[in-house]
Image (cartoon, grey):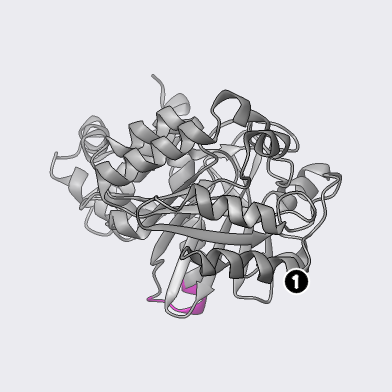
Amino acid sequence: MTDAATSQVSLIGMDQDQLTEAVVAAGGKAFAGKQLAQWLYGKRVSDFAEMSNLGKELRSQLASRFSLLTSSVVAREESGEGTTKLGIRLVDGLIIESVLMRESDRLTACISTQAGCAMGCRFCASGQLGLKRHLTAGEILEQFFHLTAVVRQESPDGWLTNVVVMGMGEPLHNFDGLMGALTILNADWGFRFGARRVTVSSVGLPDRIRQLAEQGYQFNLAISLHATTDEQRTALIPTNVASGLKKILEAARYYFETTNREVTFEYTLVGAANDTEADAHRLAALLFEFPRANVNLIPMNPVEGSGLKEPTDQSVDQFAAILQDAGVNVHVRRKRGRRVQAACGQLRLRLEAK
């Protein structure tokens, strides 16, 4: 393969063995593979010139054969609520989103795993243009480089503390790309993110939830439930017809029993669709025997063309109160990003419309 061809291949997303092979192929010693991994993942350096303990000739050879960042930030929006959203253009021109959320002493990266989404949730802007393609492990990880740059503009020694895989796309639909990225994220030679600081959010793909449980990691799992009957859920999430609430809850229980990690159920409240007192009581009943479950209530952000409406503050408070009275651990998630129309997927829609 020629240098011109290999220069389109990024080192980001390679594991330690692959990085060592790349170093050796470029004329370096095998031990330099560990040094390269430290620069890329430990220090998140995206410029060969900064990798000072690699020989100049080796850096030159690597630069001629491989890329580092293949994506670029094309838009940045601040919500005024501690949230920064980035629009990131991939090498083929597709756009994804990544978000930095600041809260107390936590700096959380919200990352995407797909360009678009195939799940078709009516209240989410991410899937309005459908699924374009899966992201590679490297493209998933590049988002950390872009978000780290935002953090270090504010504090040179700043580091991301938590990761939520809740951006564009269904993570478990892109299982290979997801696990490739999470493996590097968790590894001692990688980003060194403890599994318990990582949350994977899924619309609920039962077989994939079980597969994730069997990977040997203690990632947190969040399941987007959003309804209390199959008829209601299918109306909001068309892919529910292939799974159903019963199988999703059984897979969630399996995940808990296998990993001993709490499962969080995300519930987007949609006005006059799933936010009634009856819905709250049914949700409490569904989760009554579920071990150590958490519920995040999310008042819907307005999505143009969805035909859905936001819940009232009264219905949100009433829903939460019913769950609390039933002994369910519940949190109402504060809306982030509305001031700049930056709910998930909306920045990408505006950029692609241009």
Q: Position of residue 65 (x, y in %)?
A: 38, 33
The answer to whether residue 334 is left or right of residue 274 is: left
Q: Is residue 279 above or below residue 257?
A: below
- Residue 337: quadrant of the picture: bottom right
Q: Is residue 283 above or below residue 6?
A: below
Residue at image position (47%, 65%) is 108
Could you tell me which secondary element the residue under label 1 belongs to? helix
The answer to whether residue 214 is left or right of residue 304 is: left
- Crowdedness near tag 1: few (<14), some (14–19) or many (≥20) residues, C-alpha within 10 Å: few
Specify the segment rendered in magenta.
Answer: 152-157
Q: Is residue 63 visible?
A: no
The answer to whether residue 305 is left or right of residue 33 is: right
The answer to whether residue 340 is left or right of residue 119 is: right
Q: Is residue 202 magenta?
A: no
Q: Is residue 282 above or below residue 242?
A: below
Q: Disc 1 marks which residue?
A: 314
Name the residue nearer the viewer: 141 or 60: 141
Q: Position of residue 179 (x, y in %)?
A: 36, 37
Q: Position of residue 47 (x, y in %)?
A: 41, 54
Q: Is residue 246 visible?
A: yes
